[in-house]
Image (spheres, helix red, strand yellow):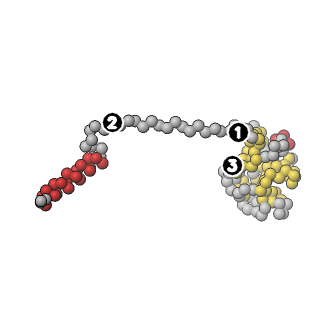
Amino acid sequence: MLTKKTLLTHVSLVATAGLLMACGGGNTHTTETPASAPAPAQVKQSAVTTVAAGNFSGRSDHITTGEVRLEKTTSGYQLNFAGDFSLDGAPDPIVAVGNNETYDPANKIGALENKTGAQVYALPASFSPADFSEVYVWCEKFNVPLGVAPLTTG
């Protein structure tokens, strides 16, 4: 028969053993093997070269800002809008390339994906950087520029 004193002694011993185990004590025969750090993941990155870059400025009473880069990748050319890109808003905005301050609807790349932030637009296989000197954000509904980024090399 357990007495109150015996029961308290057993509870005290169990609690002490639990504390020792939780604090790493009580087991002197444990051998720790150092955990080896996993090898860094090998991420295959395609080569990207910036061919030209520019900064947007607003047009037609719109605020358009941010950097755009014309890049050559292993799969062709692309326009890379930086994370600082911003358009204050407009209906039906598209992305296009132009030359010598002239917009040509035939050079439409596609609809603007987002009014802010980083975004990438693949250019057609026939794209030749020498034929274009600026990037447009254009409003098709009203046929006006919302922003233009002159491209410079180097």
Q: Is residue 81 left or right of residue 144?
A: left
Residue at the spot of label 2: 31
Mark nearer the viewer, 3 or 1: 1
Disc 2: CA contacts within 10 A as few (<14), some (14-19) or many (>=20): few
Q: Which mark is residue 35?
A: none
In percent of width and height, residue 100 lies at 86, 47
Q: Is residue 116 something one can see in this rendering?
A: yes
128 or 1, which lies in front? 1
The amino acid pointed to by label 2 is Thr
Upstream in sequence: badge 3 or badge 1 = 1
Q: Quadrant of residue 48?
A: top right
In percent of width and height, residue 59 lies at 79, 57
Q: Secondary structure at mark 1?
A: loop
Q: Secondary structure at mark 3?
A: loop
24 is higher (above) or lower (below) than 10:
above
94 is higher (above) or lower (below) than 32:
below
| Residue shown at 27% from the left, 41% from the top | 27
Find the distance from the CA under tag 3 to the CA under tag 1.
15 Å
Q: Which mark is residue 82?
A: 3
Mark nearer the viewer, 2 or 1: 2
Find the distance from the CA under tag 2 to the CA under tag 3.
52 Å
The amino acid pointed to by label 3 is Ala
55 or 1, which lies in front? 1
Mark nearer the viewer, 2 or 3: 2
Q: Quadrant of residue 32?
A: top left
